[in-house]
């Protein structure tokens, strides 16, 4: 499962450009995305992106 958050400084919507990658805000400002990927198991879930160092 992937949980993707989009954070914007001014806009209420993130719009993807025709290049299929770039995000812009519908009202300007900056837009960024952060994703956490979680492996759901029958026991304890595993956060696969835990090793990306973003929280260090």
Image (spheres, grey):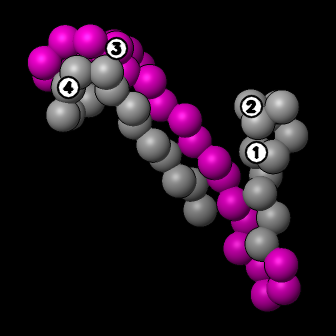
Please provide percent x and percent y for residue 49.
Answer: 76, 45
Q: Total label count?
A: 4
Q: In the rendered image of this protein, does residue 18 appear above or below residue 5?
A: above
Which is nearer the N-term, disc 3 or disc 4?
A: 4
| Pointers 1 and 3 in contact (C-beta within 8 Å) | no
Q: What is the C-alpha distance between the residues marked 3 and 4? A: 8 Å
Q: What is the C-alpha distance between the residues marked 2 and 4? A: 24 Å
Is residue 20 found inside the magenta-colored segment of the image?
A: yes
Residue carrying label 4: 11
For mark 4, give the secondary structure.
Answer: loop
Residue carrying label 3: 30
Is residue 51 found inside the magenta-colored segment of the image?
A: no
Asked whether residue 48 appears in the rendered view, the answer is yes
Query: Quarter of the image holding residue 45?
Result: bottom right
Please provide percent x and percent y for residue 14.
Answer: 26, 29
Residue carrying label 2: 54
Query: Which mark's residue is nearer the viewer, 1 or 2?
Result: 2
| Pointers 1 and 2 in contact (C-beta within 8 Å) | yes
For mark 3, give the secondary structure.
Answer: loop
């Amino acid at each position: 499962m992937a949980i993707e958050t989009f954070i914007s400084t001014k806009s209420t919507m993130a719009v993807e450009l025709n290049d299929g990658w770039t995000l812009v805000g519908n009202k300007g400002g900056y837009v960024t995305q952060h994703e956490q990927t979680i492996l759901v198991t029958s026991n304890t879930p595993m956060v696969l992106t835990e090793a990306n160092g973003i929280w260090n």
